[in-house]
Image: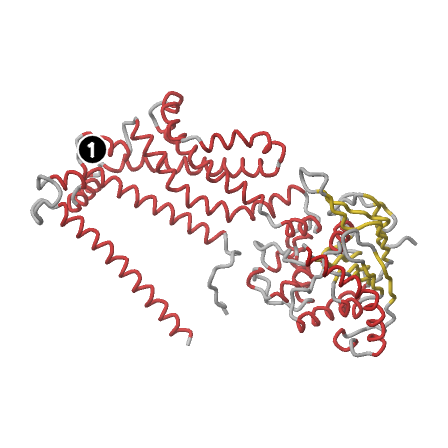
């Protein structure tokens, strides 16, 4: 069976407008395969092209070289079998919570009544019953993330692409959201690509952790299977000896890259 | 706790309003004292009546306003000016929104037209009035045309800017949720540009009046601008000032209506201060 998502030998080079001599290669020769029902995290120092990779998988960005296949079919245009959760605010500020959640269904031509009913159901599942009429600016950061989760899950995508979705939240809210994500995910185990720079978050959520090298021209330099039992509680699993073992192992490989990435940022 | 806070707010507002009214009263008194031929000896002018000749007298100005409405002679002029203004405002806004959306979403067209748009915008467009008189005659149409050229560009540039400033993340999100280009236009670009449109509407209310009144001033047989022009011919400063005050009042009214529409349509926008409404 083909993997749910396969990025093969992806390269992304950006050239600044009007000056083609000034080029920047974000990722080079990157291959990433995600099996059906697999939760894969991609970690790496800041500025290593993680988001670029995710945008390629989403079909929002055309790679300079390489191919993307989704369940064996070559991707052209937007990846309609994937849901995307962005790092920054992506809710439509002019739509209230329920209208945001049902937006995807509406775009797909579902009647308003049915979309509304399903939207209500999803708001309930993320614990936001009673907040239907609130606009994004009237919700807290955690609530907005819940709305974004519901907005993504309501379309029942087979692949979830998540770009540091909880990085803006405080640590408690973040762990709550991570547990919630695991719970939603465990219902029907979609394939997940979860981007983060937080190794602990990556290990506690994933089946597999892929480490990217520091940019420019970053590529995967490590691939680790996380054999921790499920279901997990992200706050508690961090205290398990096996977790600490895995963390130490991956960190050893990552440390050098993080320092490289840091040095790079200092130079800019 | 909350009611006492509300009370405080209401009190502060009341104080502000009374100070504002006081400023108005002071200005009127000052105007009256300085222009009245009998109250003060002429400070600057050689003759006692000259101050009133140049600046009008508040009491006579209000008497003129009163007489206009009491006799009913103002209504047909006011009607003409308001129709011209509203038509210019509507046509200018709608065409500005449509054209702005189109140009912002088609890079090729905007690249080709860019220098021309800059040129037309830089041109002092009031001088188009004589051309519009030739094209559209001395009736309402030429004034509307003048107002439209003024309003259109303000709205157009704001919509253009508004569309270009759409959050790329919101846009990408809508695309991932399966929005077609048409749906993107309706559900992302237009609502996102709306806050810019309203900002521009506040600016263009005044300009719609400018178009109508300047047009009337330059050639017409009806309207407030025509009245002002006529009064000026007799050096009747009181009537000129009365006309200006009347126009200002209606411009404020139209601006208030725009604000009301904005408040209704832009509920999603964060206000600076917002409390729980539970």
The number of callouts visible is 1
* Quarter assignment of residue B68: top left
* Quarter assignment of residue B241: top left
Residue that label 1 marks: B231
In terms of depth relative to the viewer, which is nearer, A103 or B31? Answer: B31
- Residue furthest top as drawn: B134
Q: Residue A207 appears at what percent x and percent y?
A: 84, 66
Please name the colour scheme applied to the rendered image: secondary structure
Q: Which chain letter goes with mark 1?
A: B
* Quarter assignment of residue A40: bottom right
Q: Residue B43 appears at what percent x and percent y?
A: 11, 45
Residue drawn at point x = 52 percent, y = 47 percent: B194
Instruction: Identify whether B139 is placed above or below A219.
Output: above
Q: For this view, does A234 lie left or right of residue B122?
A: right
Q: Residue A167 appears at what percent x and percent y?
A: 68, 64
- Residue furthest front as drawn: A267
Secondary element type, mark 1 = helix
Graded by Cα atoms within 10 Å as few (under 14), some (14 to 19) or many (20 or more), the crowding at tag 1 reads some
Residue drawn at point x = 64 percent, y = 45 percent: B184
Residue drawn at point x = 53 percent, y = 56 percent: B268
Q: For this view, does A180 lie left or right of residue B72?
A: right
Residue drawn at point x = 82 percent, y = 61 percent: A211
Q: Residue A73 appears at what percent x and percent y?
A: 86, 46
- Residue furthest right as drawn: A1
Which image quarter holds the N terminus of chain B? bottom left
Instruction: Identify whether B228 is placed above or below A30.
Output: above
């Amino acid at each position: 069976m083909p993997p749910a998502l396969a990025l093969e030998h992806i390269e992304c080079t950006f050239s600044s407008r009007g000056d083609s001599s000034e080029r920047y290669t974000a990722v080079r020769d990157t291959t990433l395969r995600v099996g059906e029902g697999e939760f894969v995290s991609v970690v790496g120092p800041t500025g290593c092209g993680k988001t670029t990779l995710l945008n390629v998988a989403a079909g929002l960005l055309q790679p300079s070289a390489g191919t993307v296949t989704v369940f064996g079919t070559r991707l052209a245009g937007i990846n309609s079998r994937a849901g995307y959760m962005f790092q920054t605010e992506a809710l439509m500020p002019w739509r209230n919570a329920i209208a945001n959640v049902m937006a995807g269904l509406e775009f797909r031509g579902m009647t308003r009544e049915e979309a509304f009913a399903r939207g209500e159901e999803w708001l309930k599942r993320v614990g936001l019953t009673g907040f239907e009429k609130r606009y994004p600016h009237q919700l807290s950061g955690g609530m907005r993330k819940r709305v974004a989760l519901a907005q993504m899950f309501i379309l029942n995508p087979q692949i979830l692409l998540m770009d540091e979705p909880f990085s803006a939240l405080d640590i408690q809210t973040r762990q709550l959201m991570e547990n919630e994500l695991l719970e939603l995910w465990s219902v029907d185990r979609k394939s997940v690509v979860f981007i983060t720079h937080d190794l602990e978050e990556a290990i506690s959520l994933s089946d597999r952790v892929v480490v990217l090298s520091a940019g420019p021209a970053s590529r995967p330099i490590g691939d680790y299977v996380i054999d921790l039992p499920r279901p997990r509680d992200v706050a508690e699993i961090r205290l398990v000896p096996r977790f600490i073992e895995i963390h130490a192992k991956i960190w050893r490989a990552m440390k050098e890259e993080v320092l490289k990435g840091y040095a790079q940022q200092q130079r800019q | 706790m909350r009611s006492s806070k509300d009370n405080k707010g209401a009190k502060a507002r009341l104080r502000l309003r009374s100070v504002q009214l006081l400023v108005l009263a002071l200005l009127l008194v000052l105007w009256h004292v300085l222009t009245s031929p009998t109250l003060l000896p002429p400070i600057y002018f050689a003759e006692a009546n000259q101050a009133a000749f140049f600046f009008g007298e508040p009491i006579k100005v209000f008497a003129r306003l009163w007489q206009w409405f009491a006799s009913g002679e103002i209504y047909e002029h006011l009607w003409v000016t308001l129709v011209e203004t509203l038509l210019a405002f509507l046509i200018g806004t709608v065409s500005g929104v449509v054209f702005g959306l189109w140009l912002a979403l088609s890079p090729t067209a905007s690249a080709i037209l860019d220098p021309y748009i800059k040129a037309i915008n830089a041109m002092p467009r009031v001088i188009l009035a004589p051309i519009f008189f030739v094209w559209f005659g001395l009736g309402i149409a030429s004034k509307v045309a003048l107002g439209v050229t003024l309003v259109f560009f303000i709205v157009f540039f704001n919509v253009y800017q508004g569309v270009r400033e759409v959050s790329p993340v919101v846009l990408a999100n809508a695309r991932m949720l399966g929005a077609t280009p048409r749906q993107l236009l309706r559900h992302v670009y237009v609502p996102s540009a709306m806050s810019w449109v309203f900002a521009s509407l506040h600016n263009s209310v005044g300009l719609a009046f400018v178009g109508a009144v300047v047009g009337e001033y330059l050639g017409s047989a009806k309207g407030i601008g025509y009245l002002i022009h006529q009064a000026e011919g007799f050096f009747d400063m009181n009537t000129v000032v009365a006309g200006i005050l009347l126009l200002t009042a209606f411009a404020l009214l139209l601006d208030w209506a725009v604000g009301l529409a904005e408040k209704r349509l832009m509920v999603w926008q964060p206000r600076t201060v917002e409390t729980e409404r539970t």
